[in-house]
Each structure stands twice: as structure tokens, then as C-alpha cells.
Amino acid sequence: MVIALVRTVILYLLIIAGLRLMGKRQIGELEPSELVLALLIADLAAVPMQDFGIPLLTGVIPILTLLCLTTILSVATMKSRRARDLLCGRPSVIIRDGRPDQREMRRNRFTLDELAEELRVKGYADLSAVKYAILETNGQLSVLPYAAQAPATAAQLGVMPPEPGLPRVLISDGALLPGALAGAGRDEDWLREQLRARGLSSPGQVFLCTVDETGKVCLIPREAVG
Amino acid sequence: MRRALVSAALLLALAAAVLAGSAALDRLTGQLTAEVERTAVLALTEDWPAAREAADGILRSWDRQAFLLHTTLRHGDLREIELTLERLRTYAGQMDAGQCAVAAAEAAALLDQLAQSERLTLENIL
């Protein structure tokens, strides 16, 4: 059993390293090559994890090989348009000027039911409201409505709301994040002042404290654990 | 780009390592097969002290490579060969020429099969 434990730890760390190499995409947004990699790695790792009669290397070598190939291919797709088209495919325009392109739908094996479902998910019940719908290479459908059907933006309404800026976390669950204060251009005196203004004395009493670029502070005290 | 180069280098290193491993296994099984056949000949000529010594030598060589073999090959296959080599030693100790010949033939076949299974051939790939 100790072998199972050690092998599981090694393979788990290897898979985590592999998935980190794949970046921050969610499973639903994987490119075809990334999906194949994820499925293969899971399967390759499971075999030596359960069968102690085969060497660990029979799982590790194929996983390393796949990771190397994926890295090489991802750089190739980044550098070459042709490689990108070959490995990731091209986006397909499924709806053009409110009309479904039946040839593209057939080519992508995309049914009308699926199209209707995807449009409903995006908030469009009526096909005629959609100018373009594009099936992206990761399988997601991007919907571009007619200008008259699109929600009005602040600029179109002539309203100029203030930019909120990016909130920066200063205190997370009672812990003052090192470097965050300096990164936000503040110091501990400023933080103490903010805490005192809200009746708090130390960062340990704060669940979350953020400050954005405009200086707006959000401070949520920790609740007492009963 | 650096990441791709590192990956390509790692891939080449892996390919080189597995090819070197396959060549090393070929050499080891070749040497062991020759020793096994020599043991069988010594047993047939009833030179039992030399046969016993040869069988012991084969097991010592096998044990020296045990770690490398177990990290790269199926443990079941290795165990089967090890048991056959031990049988060969036992029969050499019992001075049984017939059984020695059978065990030697079996061990040679298993060693050949082991080397074959790791060779880079179209047959194995397909």
C-alpha cells in the first residue's frame, strides 16, 4: 500500500505540473489538442497508480512525452498561422445577418436545437436579433447582436461613470498580505487609520480589506466563530 | 520559444534514454543467454562444479541489474525469468542434466522475448 501512496503522490505532482503548463483555461475552453492531453494524462497516470506490477516509468515517460509535445505544439501554434489552423481549427460563422449558415452548421455537426440552446443561454430567444454567431475553436458560441438589439453602453447614453480601478487585496482572512500595501502605494499608518475609523484595532479582526486605484476601501470584519 | 526548446531537448533526451535502455537490455539479455547456454553445455558434459558456478554467476549478473530492470520492465516478466534462472541453479546443484537443459532453454527463450519486446521495431510499434 505504501507503493500506492508514493506512486500516487509522484503522479499527482506530475499531472499538476502538466496542467499548470496548459495554463489557466477551464475544461470547457480547452482546445482540441489540450482536451486530448488532459484525457490521455488522466488515463496514463491511472494505470501505474493501480497496477504495481508495471514500472512507474511506463506512466511517467508517456506523460512527459505528451507534455513536451504539447509545449512544442503550443509554441508552433503561437508562431505559425498555418499550424494554428491545423491544430486548433478556425472559427466558423454559424449565423450571418440573422440567417443560419446551413453548410457551416453541417460541417461543424451543429444542430438547430444546439444553436437555439446556445442563443437562449446568451439571452437571445429570437434568431433575427443576431447579426453574427461564431462557433469558436474552443467550442463556445460568440453572439454579436444587431446594433439595435444590443444593450446600450454608457458611452452611447452619453454618461461618463468614474473608472472603478482594480481592487487590491490588503488583508485576507486576518492576514496582512506582504507587499500589497506598498504595491497599493499605502503604508501601515494609513491602514491603522482605516481600521480605527471602523472600530477595529488589528488586521487579525478583518476578513477582507481591499483598496482600489481611486482609494475606495472595502473592509469586511471577521465574524466571531461561535 | 525557450520553453519549446527545453521541451524539444527533454524529448530528445527521453528518446535517447529509452533507446539506450533498449540497447543495454539487448546486451544484457545477449550475455545472459550466452551464459545460460554455456551452463546447459557444462551440465551436459557433467562438469557440475563449473555448471553451478556459471548458474550462480548468471543470478549475480541478474541481481546487479535488478534495479534498472524493475524500473523499466514489467515485474511479472522479470519474476518469471528470475524463477527460471533459480530453477537452473537448483538443477545444476542437483546434477540433473535433463532438467538443466529444459530450464536453460526456457530461460533463453524468456530472455529473448524480453529483449524482443523492447526493440524499436515496426512489429512492436503496431
Image (cartoon, coloured by chain):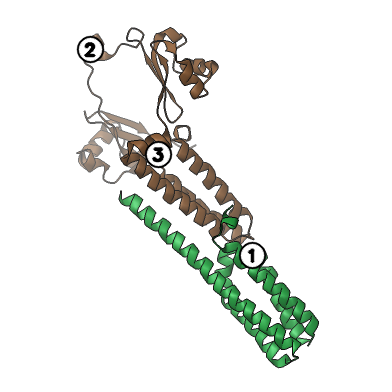
Chain colours: A brown, B green
Q: Amino acid at mark 1?
A: His
Q: Are marks 3 and 2 on the same chain?
A: yes
Query: At x 38% / y 11%, what residue is drawn?
Result: A97
Q: Residues within 10 Å of mark 1 (few under 14, many from 20)?
A: some
The disc labelled 2 sits on which kind of residue?
Val
Is tag 3's residue or tag 2's residue first in the polypeptide sequence?
3
> Is A160 left, or right, of A64 in this rendering?
left
Residue B28: give x, y in percent of width and height.
57, 74
Chain under disc 1:
B
Which type of secondary structure does the marked residue at label 2 adopt? loop
Look at discs 3 and 2 and give the one toward the viewer. Answer: 3
**Element carrying mark 1:** helix
State the residue at coordinates (49%, 64%).
B19
- The crowd level at tag 3 (other Cα within 10 Å; few <14, some 14-19, many 20+) is few
Which of the pair B64/A13 is nearer the observer? B64
What percent of the width, then of the height, locates residue B59? 64, 80
Q: Is residue A61 visible?
A: yes
Q: Local crowd at mark 2 within 10 Å, few (<14), some, or many (≥20)?
A: few
Q: The disc numbered 2 marks a residue on which chain? A: A
**Amino acid of disc 3:** Lys
Contact check, label 2 and label 1, Cβ < 8 Å: no
Q: CA distance from mark 3 to mark 2?
A: 35 Å
Q: Nearer the viewer, mark 1 or mark 3?
A: 1
Give the spatial CA distance, label 1 vs label 3. 38 Å
Using the image, tell me which numbered label, if any, was put on residue A24. 3
Between the C-alphas of marks 2 and 1, the distance is 73 Å
Badge 2 and badge 1 both on one subunit: no
- Which of the 4 image quadrants contains residue A184? top left
Q: Which residue is mark 2?
A: A159
